[in-house]
Amino acid sequence: MMWGRVSATLEPVIEIGLKHGDTLTVIPAVIDTGFSGMLCLAERYLELMAVTFSFAELYELANGEVVGQDVFVGHIVFDGRGQEVELIVTASQDTLMGAALLQNYTLTVDYPAQQVRLIRNRKKRHHS
């Protein structure tokens, strides 16, 4: 289980670790369930993470505009585990964590308590 917080601007925030070699830097990430990708990294954090170009893809923004973005691969630490993620880089000040990174979690946002909780769902094995 992971805990986060609700920011003063009512955004659910959780911390992730960015890997660059043996260096790990923890940063806040806003949970954005409207973003179907894994991670949208604020360019101010780009130097804290080793990334490799993977491919280019079209994204539709909230205003309906479609933009082309380069997709990179990098390593993060999330929920205590290192994992490879696909990410795009943005000029925004916020790093966004998308639904693809959360698909195996139950997300609870408790606004009055200003708490965010992520619980990893255990996959049940079916025997035939």
Image (cartoon, rainbow, N blue to C red):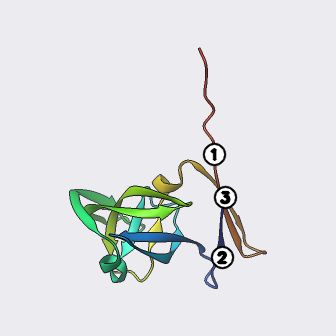
- Residue 12: give x, y in percent of width and height: 61, 71
Which is nearer the eye, 45 or 11? 45
Q: For mark 2, what is the residue?
A: 6
Residue that numbered label 3 is attached to = 1
Q: Is residue 56 above or below residue 48?
A: above
In the visual, does 5 lie left or right of 43? right
Q: Which residue is mark 1?
A: 121
SS under mark 1: loop
Q: Is residue 63 left or right of residue 112?
A: left
Residue 31 position in % (x across, y down):
54, 67
Q: Nearer the viewer, residue 101 or 22?
A: 22
Mark 2 or 1, nearer chain start:
2
Q: Is residue 69 visible?
A: no
Q: Quadrant of the C terminus?
A: top right
Q: Is residue 57 visible?
A: yes
Residues at marks 2 and 1, CA–CA distance in whole angstroms: 22 Å
Residue type at tag 3: Met
At x 49%, y 76%, the residue is 26
Amino acid type, residue under disc 1 in the picture: Asn
Q: Nearer the viewer, residue 76 or 100?
A: 76
Q: Earlier in the sequence, mark 3 or mark 2?
A: 3
Callout 2–callout 1 Cβ contact below 8 Å: no
Q: Local crowd at mark 1 within 10 Å, few (<14), some, or many (≥20)?
A: few
